[in-house]
Amino acid sequence: MKSESLSYLKKAVLEYEPETAVSWAQKAIDEGIDPLAAMDALIEAMREVGEGFGRGDLFLPDLTGAAEAMQAATPTIEKAIKARGAARKTLGKVVIGTVAGDIHTIGKSMVTTMLVAEGFEVLDIGIDVSTDRFVAAVVDYQPAILGMSALLTTTAPEAKKVIDRLAEVGLRHKIKVIVGGGAMTEAFAKSMGADGYSPTAPGAVSLCRKMIDV
Ligand code: B12
């Protein structure tokens, strides 16, 4: 029974059906299914679509269709995840955004949701975030951690620009910088001077806990 709702949820994303995806997400939550498992079903579906696109079997409208279905279902699941984090004390502030030139938002939003669920206070500054905006958010919000997401190999080096600018303005030593998203790797993260990298949202949570020692 349990996995049935999740397979239908995944199927709805693979068939680009936002309304059906919302219904199955709600059904899964009503059945008491772990919302993180529901989130995993969405991630799995997007991964399959991404692979199809990578192989040349699927095209841009397929990416958009699947992303729309996934985004439609996400608030229902997020609400259930956040409800778990509601009673926790704040662990620390995190600013997160997707680098300049990159509009991919889904992975970054998932990381945000999971950090909030864990008890972090997160300011999500959106997509296509310029170096200036990242630095301004660090100045204004004074987070313990800055997270940058990058899915395009062409724009991933933008994260290094932010790290370099933080050093130029004397803020680099005050915060931990973590990076993630499909265009990032452990080696790339190290080479640009980031403090940490994770390929997954749960990994981002462990990373943040480690960074602030909780
Ligand atoms: C959906 C999607 C889109 C949607 C985005 C919708 C949206 N609102 O976000 C649309 C259709 C708009 C799109 C557009 C494009 N896309 Co696109 N897209 C994808 C796709 C299929 C899925 C991305 C996704 O949401 N995955 C699901 C989430 C959950 O995974 P995730 O983002 O990786 O995040 C996880 C981890 O990486 C990690 N994480 C993410 N961020 C962070 C941050 C931190 C700090 C940490 C620690 C961890 C972390 O946690 C998340 C959860 O586990 C990928 C394929 C793929 N396999 O990734 C291509 C993909 C990223 N796109 C690609 C391309 C080429 C494009 C376009 C250039 C296409 C075009 N010709 O126009 C444009 C670029 C637009 C732009 N300027 O940004 C390529 C990139 C190739 C490359 N290496 O550079 C990919 C890999 C497809 C492919 N196989 O070729 N895309």
Image (tube, grey):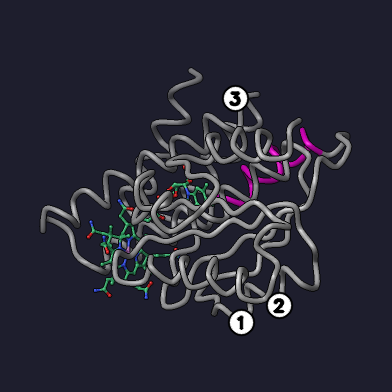
- Residue at horizontal 61%, vertical 68%? 167
- Residue at horizontal 62%, vertical 42%? 77
Pointer 3: what residue?
Answer: 33
| Local secondary structure at mark 2 | helix
Q: CA distance from mark 3 to mark 2?
A: 40 Å
Position of residue 166 measured from the top left corner of the image (x, y, whole percent): 62, 70
Q: Looking at this view, is 8 or 120 the one in front?
A: 120
Position of residue 86 measured from the top left corner of the image (x, y, whole percent): 84, 39
Label 3 environment density (alpha carbons within 10 Å; few <14, some 14–19, many ≥20): some
Above or below for 131 versus 35 = below
| Local secondary structure at mark 3 | loop
Residue type (three-letter) at the residue carrying disc 1: Asp
Residue type (three-letter) at the residue carrying disc 2: Ala
Residue found at the far left of this picture: 56
Position of residue 109 measured from the top left corner of the image (x, y, whole percent): 57, 55
Q: Which sits earlier in the primary sequence, circle 1 or circle 3?
A: 3
Q: Nearer the viewer, mark 1 or mark 3?
A: 1
Choose top left, top right, bottom left or bottom right for residue 138.
bottom right
Q: Are marks 2 and 1 in contact (CB under 8 Å)?
A: yes
- Residue at horizontal 37%, vertical 60%? 151
Read off the magenta span: 74-85
In the image, the residue with mark 2 has its CB under 8 Å from the nearest atom of ligand 1: no
In the image, the residue with mark 1 has its CB under 8 Å from the nearest atom of ligand 1: no
Q: Which sits earlier in the primary sequence, circle 3 or circle 2?
A: 3
Q: Looking at this view, is 97 or 211 the one in front?
A: 211
**Which mark, by number, is residue 136?**
2
Q: Are marks 1 and 3 in contact (CB under 8 Å)?
A: no
Choose top left, top right, bottom left or bottom right for residue 143.
bottom right
Pointer 1: what residue?
Answer: 132
3 displayed left or right of 163: left
Above or below for 53 versus 209 = below
Q: CA distance from mark 1 to mark 3?
A: 42 Å
